[in-house]
Image: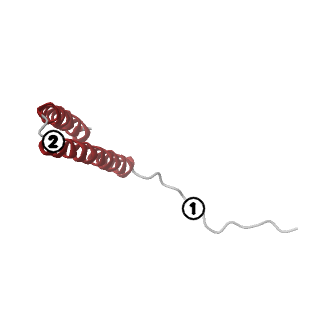
Amino acid sequence: MSVPVIDAIAVATPESTTSTQDEIKAADLLTFKIGMATVAAVVFIMAIVGAVTASPALLMAAGLSGTMASLGGVYTGVNLLAA
């Protein structure tokens, strides 16, 4: 009866968590950018429709929505970058 011989032992070193955290941070920022681009496109289309139809209510709503989205976007973006 022969016993198997182990020639080399593979030592697994744990990967650094900073690269994983950087990847997660990059994914969060990309998701945020996609979401903000979508909001910007919708507000832009809303403003164009308001301008074409000469609807002051739609233009004001587009302006207020754009202002709220930009302020919220700056706040969220700063927090994502600081994390």
Quick one: SS at disc 2? helix
Pair 1/2: label in front:
2
Quarter location, residue 70: top left
* Image vertical order of residue 9 relative to residue 18, above or below: below
Q: How is the image coloured?
A: secondary structure
Horizontal placement of 16 versus 36: left or right?
Answer: right
Q: Which residue lies furthest to the front in this view?
A: 53
Q: Mark 2 points at which residue?
A: 53
Quarter location, residue 39: top left
Quarter of the picture containing the C terminus is top left
Where does the image place residue 29, in percent across and percent down from the top left? 29, 46
Crowdedness near tag 2: few (<14), some (14–19) or many (≥20) residues, C-alpha within 10 Å: few
Among numbered discs 1 and 2, the one appearing first in the sequence: 1
Horizontal placement of 3 versus 37: left or right?
Answer: right
Where does the image place residue 68, in percent across and percent down from the top left? 17, 31
Crowdedness near tag 1: few (<14), some (14–19) or many (≥20) residues, C-alpha within 10 Å: few
Which is nearer the eye, 64 or 36? 64
Quick one: SS at disc 1? loop
Quarter location, residue 1: bottom right
- Which residue sits at x=11%, y=39%? 54
Q: How far apart are marks 1 and 2 (CA)?
A: 71 Å
* Image vertical order of residue 59 relative to residue 11, above or below: above
Which is nearer the eye, 39 or 75? 39
Q: What residue type is labelled 1?
A: Ala
For residue 77, which numbered disc appears in the image? none
Which is nearer the eye, 40 or 79? 40
* Image vertical order of residue 45 relative to residue 12, above or below: above
Q: Mark 1 points at which residue?
A: 10
